[in-house]
Image (tube, rainbow, N blue to C red):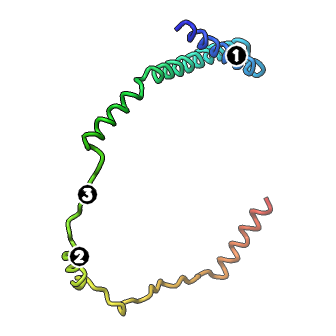
Amino acid sequence: MTGKLRYCWLFGFIGFLITLAISTGNNLFMTSLVRGLIAFAVWFGLSYAALWMFDALREQPNQSKDEELTATFSEQGKGGNYDLTTPDESEELNDLLKQPPVNSVNINDFSPLNPPKLVKTTNDKDAEELVKVVRHLTEE
């Protein structure tokens, strides 16, 4: 595990240097140093988690045990076939098709929508007042 921790320290240090170099140009040195230390902790944690995950995947049992299990099941004939049969419902479907629909809609009952017409009710007096308001607003 010591060799793996060296990699974690190395990744953390690289993250610290990159963050410090980028942040120094825009911030005070102390702010850049704090952000660099935060970046060190984050990179160290990410690399430690990644190495731990790779170790866990590497220590999984061999695939030969899985092959032995599949060979055992295939010899017994279990899990090899899956038979499905559906009941014959053709008579019920034919009965449903033969019955007329309960709520039949007559095609001749259609009538188009007739919305009320909008009528413009503006007087000449209103138009003149509107023009005065627009002229007054454009002058200011």
Q: Residues within 10 Å of mark 3 (few under 14, many from 20)?
A: few
Residue flagged by tag 2: what amino acid is it?
A: Leu
Q: Residue 10's quadrant in the figure?
A: top right
Residue drawn 26% across the image and 55% down it: 83
Q: CA distance from mark 3 to mark 2?
A: 21 Å
Residue flagged by tag 1: what amino acid is it?
A: Ser
Query: What secondary structure is found at the residue carrying circle 1?
Result: helix
Residue drawn 69% across the image and 72% down it: 130
Kindly identify which residue carries mark 3: 84
Whole-percent x, y for residue 33 in the image? 68, 12
Tell me if residue 11 comes above or below residue 100 in the rendering: above
Q: Residues within 10 Å of mark 2 (few under 14, many from 20)?
A: few
Of labels 3 and 2, earlier in sequence is 3
Query: What secondary structure is found at the residue carrying circle 3?
Result: loop
User: Mark 3, mark 2: which one is toward the viewer?
Assistant: 3
Residue drawn 23% across the image and 61% down it: 85
Q: Is residue 56 left or right of residue 31?
A: left
Kindly identify which residue carries mark 2: 93
Quarter placement of the C terminus: bottom right
Q: Please tell me which residue lies in front, 60 or 53.
A: 60
Q: Is residue 80 left or right of residue 126?
A: left
Whole-percent x, y for residue 53 in the image? 49, 22
Residue flagged by tag 3: what amino acid is it?
A: Leu
Tell me if residue 108 comes above or below residue 129 in the rendering: below
Q: Is residue 98 left or right of residue 41?
A: left
User: Mark 1, mark 2: which one is toward the viewer?
Assistant: 2
Kindly identify which residue carries mark 1: 32
Residue drawn 59% across the image and 82% down it: 120
